[in-house]
Image (cartoon, helix red, strand yellow):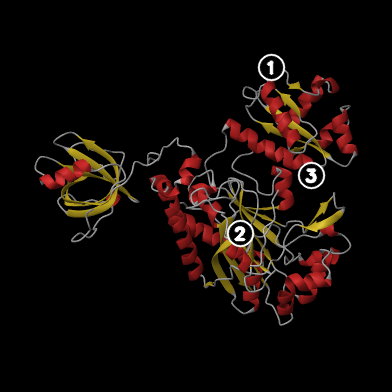
Amino acid sequence: MDTMKGLKRTNYCGETRGAGSTAVVGGYVQKIRDMGNLIFIDLRDRTGIVQLAFDDHTDREVFEKAKSCRGEYVLMAKGTVRARESVNKEIKTGDIEIYVDDLRILAKAQTPPFEIVNDTNVNEELRLKYRYLDLRRNVLQKNIMLRGEIAKAARDYFYDNGFIEIETPMMMKSTPEGARDYIVPSRIHHGKFYALPQSPQIYKQLLMISGFDRYIQLARCFRDEDLRADRQPEFTQIDLEMSFVDVDDILEMAEGFIKYLYKTVLDIDIPVPLPRLTYNEAMERFGSDKPDTRFGMEIRNISEAVKNSEFAVFRSALENGGSVRAIVVPDAAAVYTRKEIDKLVEYSKGIGAKGLAYVRWVDEEPNASFKKFFAPEEIMSLMDTLGAKRGDVVLIVADKDKITLPVLGALRLQTAKKLDIIPNTWNFLWITDFPFFEYDEEAGEWAAMHHPFTMPKDECIQYLDSAPEKVIAKAFDLVLNGTELSSGSIRINDYELQQKMFGSLGLTDEEIEAKFGFLVDAYKYGAAPHGGMGIGLDRLAMLMADCDSLRDVTAFPKVQNASELMSQAPGSVDEAQLEELAIKLTDSE
């Protein structure tokens, strides 16, 4: 095997320019074209590809070495940059090549289990097993580098705005934060466990109490939850906290970051201030607290228009305090045949609806699933109320609002995707004024929607005990194209109010002391008003890279069952390690 001695890389492959200059490049063999007395090698690194050229005038030893190369060999080459005879417009360096006079084979390679190309049909499971090979693909390298640019932009922006980067512990006490903890047994304290942080929430509040009024961290977080395309068990937050602020201050700081980030990384101008919707507005109009506002199809309340209907489904919903709501799916009648609408009916039932009424307008007269209960002119009047036209489909759900709104919100998204009517734009918005509590019908009690340190709006504190449904939180979410990027809030900074809040959540004094004692004690020594948020770096990278899964922007991701196929984690540990930790395994069956 050759060495690098005497050679030092001067150029990246994809950035090689300047005909007549001497260049030294290093990389992996992407492709070889051997035409007897002429050899071309495409050499690849993270910046792209450059063509290496060898011919009859090349030193014979160098020529024979080039002839022996195979795909994924690691090479260094030195030569003269010259114009190519046949230009390749598909690559950045398509108008030049390197005429090689020194070639080193630094490492040979076996034939990989799949071809290293961007457009691959290879099973993802195989690619994840050989992730180090999959990551050689330029499309994934670009995603990972984009993620790095986001991290750099975050640090640059927040450093420039007076934030201090402070690391918080990775092994902490388990505290309730809404998801299942990953726990770490202690070797020294048998029977005791650390938890990996679901977020740095408590520590960043303590940092505010400590007087660090602007904190930032690219924080690793861990949640033992079932996985999906936009969730991994470990993820990164651009985590921030600020003192002496209220909601507007935090939102304006975050908006400045979004504007800076998109201009710096993608050269896109995001107009600020970003639009804002209250939680109630978002649910009423879009049926979601993370609405995709790139298209219309807003939910309409048609309760008044159908209140005198003989249709039992509508009448029963209204009599039971519910509503009748609808969306108009434009120009959908040709796509949504009766068979396709039946699929929507089943889908609606699967997400909580008792059924789905519809109007499909193909012919002169609209055809409604409930037409025997409505006169033709009544159906036409309903269409006029909704602004529906021939060719449209109207979907209607009648039930309690907690059913009608999210079901129609889900149908809105599903039908828009099927019709391919969602434009490729960047629609950021804030969702504000979240309810503080939500009613748990199974438990028959009110439960907190947020972590227990969230501040209620000042005018709502009086209702904490008497009317929990009236309490609004100083909480907010940042949403992009229907994906939640961030949650944040103003935190409680008053000891007595915090104790009252714990009581409202049903925590006993013993539970408060066991779970939050150190934080409660800290409040006794004075805490500045503070608040913050955590922006999901992974989800932001996924959307900015136009990917469908977090796996595409995560170097070594987990799969659905939280395992990593390449390293085979999680794995077993030997008996000696278990004995040190005073842990005995039982039969899992």
The residue identified by callout 2 is 222
Residue at the bottom extreme, as displayed: 525
- N-terminal-most mark, 3 or 2: 2
Identity of the residue drawn at 31% across and 39% down: 90
Q: Is residue 76 left or right of residue 516?
A: left
- N-terminal-most mark, 3 or 1: 1
Residue at the top extreme, as displayed: 364
Q: Which marked residue is nearer to the observer: mark 3 or mark 1?
A: 3
Expressed as whole percent of the image width and height from the top left, the position of residue 305 reads 82, 33
Alpha-carbon span between mark 3 and mark 1 = 34 Å
SS of the residue at dot 1?
A: loop
Q: Nearer the viewer, residue 165 or 100?
A: 100
Q: Amino acid at mark 2?
A: Phe
SS of the residue at dot 2?
A: strand
Decide: few, some or many residues near mark 1? Use Cα within 10 Å; few <14, some 14-19, many ≥20. few
Expressed as whole percent of the image width and height from the top left, the position of residue 174 reads 69, 66
Task: Indicate the quadrant where residue 176 lies.
Answer: bottom right
Residue at the right extreme, as displayed: 319
Identity of the residue drawn at 27% across and 42% down: 70
Q: Which mark is residue 363?
A: 1
**Is residue 388 in sight in this rendering?**
no
Q: Is residue 289 above or below residue 325?
A: below
Q: Is residue 36 above or below residue 468?
A: above
SS of the residue at dot 3?
A: helix
Q: Amino acid at mark 3?
A: Lys
Q: Is residue 245 left or right of residue 141?
A: right
The residue identified by callout 3 is 402
Expressed as whole percent of the image width and height from the top left, the position of residue 454 reads 72, 65
Q: Which marked residue is nearer to the observer: mark 3 or mark 2?
A: 2
Q: Is residue 542 left or right of residue 398?
A: left
Q: Nearer the viewer, residue 552 or 570?
A: 570
